[in-house]
Image (cartoon, rainbow, N blue to C red):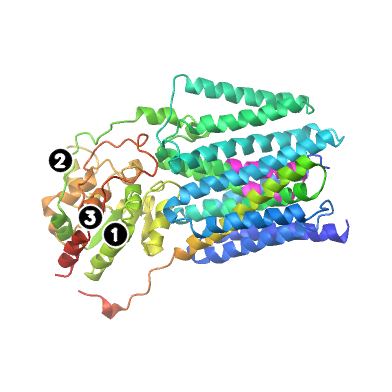
Amino acid sequence: MTPRELLIQAAYIAASVLFILGLRSLTKAETARRGMQQAALGMVIAVAGTLLHHEILTYSWILAGLVIGSIIGYPLGVYVPMTAMPQRIAISHVFGALAATLVGIAEYYTHLHGGEPVSTPLMAALGFEVVFGALTVSGSFMAFSKLQELIPGRPLTYRGQNVANIALFAVTIGSFGYLLLHPGAEQVFYLMVGLALLSGILLVLPIGGADMPVVISLMNSYAGLASAATGFAIGNNVLIIAGALDGASGFILSIVMSKAMNRSFGNVLFGAFGSVVAGGSGKTAEGLTVREISVEDAAMQLAYARSVIVVPGYGLAVAQAQHTVRELADLIEKRGGEVKYAIHPVAGRMPGHMNVLLAEANVPYDRLVEMDEINPQFPAGGRGAGDRRQRRGEPGGPERPVEPDLRHADPERGPGPEGDRDEAKHEPGLRGHRERAVLQRKDVDALRGRQAVADAPRERGEDAVGQAPQGRTSRTSDVRAIRSWASR
Amino acid sequence: MTYLGFIEIYVFILAGFVGFMVITRVPPLLHTPLMSATNAISAISLVGSLVAAGSERNQVSTILGFVAVISATINAVGGFIITDRMLKMFRRQPEQVPGEKKP
């Protein structure tokens, strides 16, 4: 090993360690920022090391590419608003996977036309690389287009869709298999790339906007696997490590997301989610009444509440109400109340999106409580819903918390079906200061002088992605009304 | 250049385990930064793109490599910046002075 190679390998090892430490730092919000800066340093070291690579002869293309990439990348990092994070991530999956795919194709082409035969193991690595890569490129681009509303966000379905998708998938796998036996079949290779691209499009086509968190996580995982496969193909360990980390992360997030949406992971993995969505429509909270409350009412209840749990949904973010909610929270806190935020895992359009949006509105992160932690704190165990349940002969007494509300939440409408918590909230006896009030998105809407969306069955599929509700203008007079209440 | 060695498979599997263990501990609070972080990290495929773009093996490789360098750089630069931007926003509750609270 020449000193130069030694240096390159040392750079890669340093980069790998820094990446792992960087991800580790994300387990705590205090350490996260610093850790990610270390990871960025790792990236710089790895790139600097690679530039010493003996195979690199000209630097003009490299330099041009680095400069152009930085010029495009910088605004994508600095100016994209936080509400657009899902699109932003989706498009970056496109770029990441595109890089992997192109390297794979270049590698294949070079081997084939450079007189070096493509061995079967190399073919396997390249195959995984381009299939995962191409699938992610087109799939993520579809996700991006849906989120950006370039195409309709609702699921696009047609008869025999699943059969067509499975057939396409089978042909892709078949051509991969053929290539393993005959790595020299160039046409089949490009056919496979094309089929993988097509699969990505058709895979995401039937998926509605609300399911995008799962798709984005899955694409994250695929992009990682494509990177890892690149590492196998060119024999580079840092690529394998980074790809494996990325793949694991996407995989875990998709599991978390699908659990939160009450789907099996198999359902998610094979992309059959479209069919499930199509079936689950028009489900109004059966037999449960939703009581609308006026702004005055809400203001009064909130003004006397000791403990308020805000359950934000995506609509809140679209309406840019998070800042108003924070203002409201400040008022309640000034009066001695305590405000917490219950965050459903898929509130928003991607994993953890709502946390970021609220953090942007200056909500301290220790007020953001995750689903499993906050569920026992809902007022169901008090005098409200628990009593009623018992009266109805249902399980769940006054002493123990009823089944966690947030778990069956619909990310579109925010948590629901509007059941026990609403009953609890509007129970006449709730005025007592020991009770807790729960603020839901529609309450926030009401507070902002909008007609509460009561319980219009907004199906998750049909709701266009990122669709801003029409006619929602904030009325400062309502905020003022609340403010005047709060200051009494 | 390479023959798929078992070393690589070891590396992949072990890194996968490390990733799994580290990432399961990341709280949902930071899932969005996590995703953008892993995305930025996987821009390490830049390393492969650089070799493809600069090795003058053939024109196809150079051009594809060039495009790959651009897209990987976009992710590396933009990804780390936006992750940092997000993490900057997460802050703790400021310590409250007890006397300040209204009854």
- Residue A439 on image: x %, y %: 25, 53
- Residue at numbered disc 2: A391
Q: Is residue B50 above or below residue B100?
A: above
CA separation, marks 2 and 3?
35 Å
Q: Is residue A333 visible?
A: yes
Q: Earlier in the sequence, mark 1 or mark 3?
A: 1
- In the figure, is residue A212 to the left or right of A232? left
Q: Nearer the viewer, mark 1 or mark 3?
A: 3
- Residue A143 on image: x %, y %: 49, 40
Viewer-proximal residue, A114 or B62? B62
Q: Is residue A244 magenta?
A: yes
Residue at 45 percent across and 64 percent down: it is: B89
Magenta-highlighted residues:
A222-245
Q: Amino acid at mark 1?
A: Val
Task: Identify the image quadrant of residue A22.
Answer: bottom right
Disc marking residue A448: 3
- In the figure, is residue A316 to the left or right of A435? right
- Residue at numbered disc 1: A325
- In the figure, is residue A406 to the left or right of A27? left
Callout 2: chain = A
- Residue B96 on image: x %, y %: 33, 75
Q: Nearer the viewer, mark 2 or mark 3?
A: 3
Disc marking residue A464: none
